[in-house]
Amino acid sequence: MTPLRIAVVGYGKLGVIHTRLLADSELFELVGVVDPMLENRSLATETHGVIGYECVDEILDQIDCAVVATPTVFHHDVCSILLAAGKHVLVEKPITATVSEAQSLVALAAFHRVKLQVGHVVRFDPHFQTGQNLIQEPRLIECTRASGYTFRSMDVGVTLDLMIHDLDLVLSLVDSPVKSLQATGCAVIGPHEDIAHARLTFENGTMANLTASRTSHTQVRCLQATGSSGHVSIDFMNNEFVNFVGVGDALGALDIDPVTASDAVKQDVTERFFTELLPQQSVPITPCNAIEEEHRDFHRSISEDSSPIVCGSTGLRVLEIATRIAETIKAGTTDEPVSAKGPHFDNAPSSAESTTLYKSHVRGV
Ligand SMILES: NC(=O)c1ccc[n+]([C@@H]2O[C@H](COP(=O)([O-])OP(=O)(O)OC[C@H]3O[C@@H](n4cnc5c(N)ncnc54)[C@H](O)[C@@H]3O)[C@@H](O)[C@H]2O)c1
């Protein structure tokens, strides 16, 4: 099998991880790294012996495909250049900063008949892969994703930064259109929302509650789903098990009146609760590197000419819902965009001003 020639565009936190894995991959030949910052390019050359390029145009004739890990506000411009040149693209999540930008990338990829994959990497997480096989006909899903403040991804709010991971998972689990959504949130540091809560109701009646915070003193990443087969509880921070509480046969045969039952009957039921009635088990996961699996899927989709698991249209749908949530938060909290003020920054710039400011600090294409 001939490896595909690949470049990593954006050698920051995520780009460093992609580069390290691709440099060791048998599926790809790492041709170069693109970053406008000289010190980042030098670091890539020093670490992996690859050539650093200042601009993506400089490497187009040497590659088959690219991973784009620039700040989100530059995804559209960078991906457009790559797709228009006929290169397959794996772009980090979220697909773009706006829905219209994402629509244009999806159309461009289709026009040039190249693959556009979006880095919703939790789909490849072994916890989720084990858990999703246990969940049947989910009725209620709850997701929490919280971390401390890192001063990263400030170009977007927490909805597009963190909650979008869980939105992608929820939309992949529920085979029904979103009927309605409610959301609330606030800026703590700002300028965008740093805490977000959302409730989605699907046309088939399923509900999903999502919470995301990037100003939390504890780190949490979990998903719980209750469906016809039982209750699945995934703790993404625990590397060993997915907990599953199934609906046992004995539950159907249970014939008691919980109000009038004797103490002996209550005691008996209590003792059998999580063994026979709702049998609980810890299902072991098979550890793997989710980003490596994501790369494998990218390679498979290109070499087999099939859709990647998380294609551009999926990334677009997730972004559409995330944008509705972020807009609902903005509209519902104050007369001005919520991004205009955080409790600690009374004179923080508006969202648009902040994006311009951000772009001027981090050089784009
Ligand atoms: N999949 C995940 O779990 C996950 C986690 C964190 C971040 N991300 C996503 O990855 C992307 C990058 O995030 P990060 O935290 O690595 O950011 P970062 O700021 O650490 O790195 C971004 C890099 O891109 C470079 N850059 C800026 N403009 C560029 C351009 N036009 N061409 C090439 N390089 C350019 C910057 O110099 C910087 O080195 C974001 O879209 C973010 O949402 C994904």
Image (spheres, grey):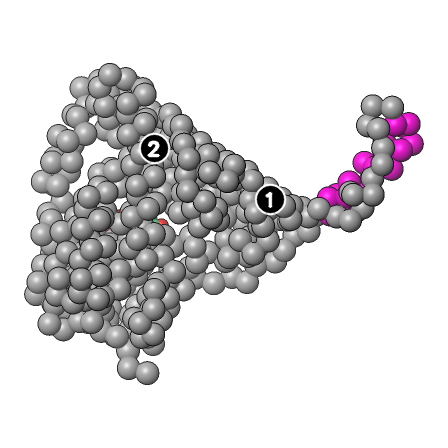
Give the image location of residue 337, x and y in percent. 23, 23
Q: Do the residues under discs 2 and 1 have CB atoms within 8 angstroms?
A: no
| Majority secondary structure of magenta residues | helix
What whole-number distance in Å separates the C-alpha atoms at marks 2 and 1? Answer: 25 Å
Give the image location of residue 322, x and y in percent. 33, 38
Residue farthest toward the bottom in the current orientation of the protein: 1
Q: Left or right: where does residue 262 sit relative to residue 124? A: right
Residue situated in front as seen by the camera: 300 or 343: 300
Say which residue label 2 marks. 325
Residue situated in front as seen by the camera: 263 or 288: 263
Give the image location of residue 171, x and y in percent. 43, 46
- Mark 1 secondary-structure assignment: strand
Amino acid tagged 1: Gly
Quarter of the figure with residue 227 = top right
Q: Left or right: where does residue 83 sit relative to residue 319? A: left
Label 2: few (<14), some (14–19) or many (≥20) C-alpha neighbours in 10 Å? many
Write the start and end of the magenta stretch as one range. Answer: 261-279
Give the image location of residue 136, x and y in percent. 58, 50
Residue situated in front as seen by the camera: 94 or 349: 94
Residue situated in front as seen by the camera: 47 or 156: 156
Quarter of the figure with residue 182 = top left
Say which residue label 1 marks. 227
Q: Is residue 229 visible?
A: yes
